[in-house]
Amino acid sequence: MSTDAIVLLKQDHKEIRRLFREFQQAGEDATARKAKLVDDIIEILTVHTYIENEVMYPRVRELLPDLEDDVLESYEEHHVADLLVVELAGMNPSAERFDAKTTVLIESVTHHIEEEEQDWFPKVRDGLGRKVLQQIGAEMQEARKKAPRRPSQPSALKKTVDAVLS
Ligand SMILES: [Fe+2]
Ligand SMILES: [Fe+2]
């Protein structure tokens, strides 16, 4: 199985988009189903954000300094999503603002994923080449094993706190 970092991240993106679509198609009254979907969305975003923040972004920043501004923008976009995720994780699914907040999360993350796939990944692939991307991917698979799955776990929360305070 390929450990190409971009291939792995795109697989995550595909699953994230699938969950987004299911939420959007779930219908007005499907509260329990939407609660479960949001739970799954929170988990996959928490893991995905962790492996990008901890491995992909720092490696690219170090190896391709020209892409530093893109990386910094990505950290900020992750941070906006983190805040929404933390709020959603603590929210009752029948609350008036639950669907609206999820919709804003979906819009924001979809925009970010599109930027990564259409603009950023091609630049990273050109700059790093296949061998380095395989190494970074292998490192991400290792990080995935110890990644937080809930935003309340200290390793997930730390990122949000760092972003607010630093
Ligand atoms: Fe990202
Ligand atoms: Fe991503």
Image: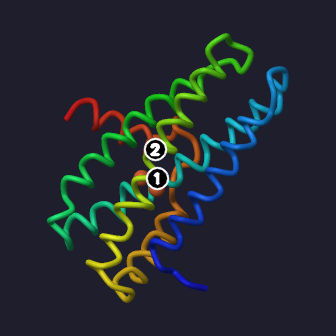
Q: Where, quadrant-wise, is the C terminus in this rendering?
A: top left
The scheme the figure's colours follow is rainbow
Q: Is residue 19 left or right of residue 25?
A: left
Counting the numbered discs, the total is 2
The crowding category of the residue bearing disc 1, from other C-alpha atoms within 10 Å (few below 14, some 14 to 19, many at least 20), is few
Residue 157 lies in quadrant: top left
Q: Is residue 110 left or right of residue 112?
A: right
Where 129 falls versus 47 (above or below)? below
Where 137 falls versus 80 (above or below)? below
Mark 1–mark 2 distance (CA, rounded to whole Å): 5 Å
Identify the residue under disc 1: 114
The crowding category of the residue bearing disc 2, from other C-alpha atoms within 10 Å (few below 14, some 14 to 19, many at least 20), is few
- Across and down, in percent, residue 123 comes to 30, 70
Amino acid beneath label 1: Glu
| Local SS, label 1 | helix
- Across and down, in percent, residue 113 comes to 47, 52
Q: Looking at the image, which residue is at 27% across and 68% down? A: 60
| Local SS, label 2 | helix
Q: Looking at the image, which residue is at 61% across and 85% down? A: 1
* Nearer-the-camera pick, 119 or 51: 119
Identify the residue under disc 2: 111
Residue lying at the far left of the rendered structure: 65
Residue lying at the far bottom of the rendered structure: 131
* Nearer-the-camera pick, 147 or 101: 101
Residue 135 lies in quadrant: bottom left
Q: Are marks 1 and 2 in contact (CB under 8 Å)?
A: yes
Amino acid beneath label 2: His
Q: Is residue 44 left or right of residue 92?
A: left
- Across and down, in percent, residue 41 comes to 63, 43
